Amino acid sequence: MADTGYSLKGKRVFVAGHRGMVGSAVCRRLAGEGCEVLTAGRDVMDLRNQASVTDWFGREKPDAVFLAAAKVGGILANDTAPADFLYDNLMIEANVIKASFDTGVEKLMFLGSSCIYPKLAEQPMREDALLTGPLEPTNEWYAIAKIAGIKLCQAYRKQHGADFISAMPTNLYGTGDNYDLRTSHVLPALLRKTLEARDSGQKQLEVWGSGTPLREFLHADDLADALVFLMQNYSDYDHVNVGSGEEISIGDLAATIVKEAGFEGALVFDATKPDGTPRKLMDSSKLHALGWRAKIGMAEGLRRTIKEYEESR
Ligand code: GFB
């Protein structure tokens, strides 16, 4: 784990996926780094189209890249659109990683997810648990794409010495999250459903699955801080887990959200919906040893997110 001391000062830094929750958090976090942040909307560059990506990189020649663009979604979206999740994410990462190498990008940060680990990996999950067992069927498509991205970064480091690193965040929430109930993750989905049930006088709130799975949550602003920290302080072959160490059962998450939001109805668990992985707590001790820890706890993060979402409705 060499300490590269890579400085972003004065650099042209491309944030792929700047409109998403993670990309927009990284743009906010970079504001204090004295670098020039480059972004490109889909009208300017379709990341799934190699020619479009090659042209843009050839023109703009970024010095550093945060690859935060991906096709992401919750358990139902992953389970019902496997071709989209596998194809789009493979194309995005292959195009951006290759164009970055071809145009001499100094450093690239690839973003994966905690779903890359085996469904029943020993908890908490260490980085070396990767590829040691079968994946969770509902999101194996996205997981395989993200594992391929990690491997592609490692291959460019091995063959060409490219300084391409990978970070694996846990389940995220925060500013600019996706609140579309068909494709969102659990926290924004429960938040939206709770506020709509409260405001329409419903007597119950539907929660998918059994409510027993455990999930670890990290606020997107914490992740952005960790990514900039890793870009400046980490340069090595293996990926790095980025977690908060705070986990909660889905049932307790729902109970916490309804309490915070002032909904008094009953929770109803819909067993026809998939539970997915029973637990996916990450071991982030490698990141801690580098000197970074999460700062936004769930209570504070949830309060901030509920307030922001209420104001945005
Ligand atoms: O956040 P989520 O969609 O994704 O679901 P995963 C987490 C748990 O929350 C599952 C339950 O057990 C869901 O059944 N859940 C309860 C709900 N109510 C709801 C609801 O209204 N909406 C949703 N979405 N879930 C994702 C992967 O897995 O984790 C992605 O599919 C990515 O690829 C992401 O890796 C980080 O945590 O199960």
Image (cartoon, rainbow, N blue to C red):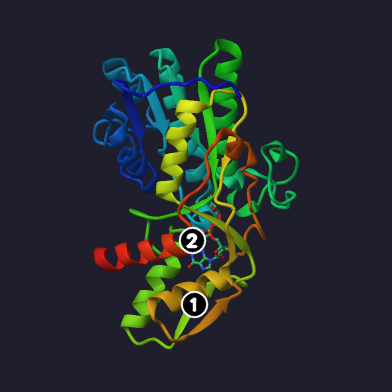
Q: Residue 264, percent across and down?
A: 43, 86
Q: Residue 170, percent across and down?
A: 55, 49
Q: Secondary structure at mark 2?
A: helix
Q: Nearer the viewer, mark 2 or mark 1?
A: 2
Report the quarter where the N terminus lies.
Answer: top right
Q: Name which residue lies at 46% across and 36% down.
A: 227
Which amino acid, mark 1? Glu
Q: Residue 135, percent across and down?
A: 68, 47
Residue 50 in view of the camera: no
What residue does disc 2 label?
A: 298
Q: Quadrant of residue 53?
A: top left
Report the quarter where the C terminus lies.
Answer: bottom left
Q: Residues within 10 Å of mark 1 (few under 14, many from 20)?
A: some
Instruction: Please give left or right for residue 258 compared with residue 31 in the image.
Output: right
What residue does disc 1 label?
A: 206
Residue 114 to residue 51: above or below: below
Residue 45 in view of the camera: yes
Q: Residue 63, percent across and down?
A: 36, 19
Is 142 in front, or is 216?
A: 216
Instruction: Please give left or right for residue 16 compared with residue 130 in the image.
Output: left
Q: Name which residue lies at 41% across and 31% down.
A: 66
Q: Name which residue lies at 31% across and 81% down.
A: 199
Q: Secondary structure at mark 1?
A: strand
Which amino acid, mark 2? Met
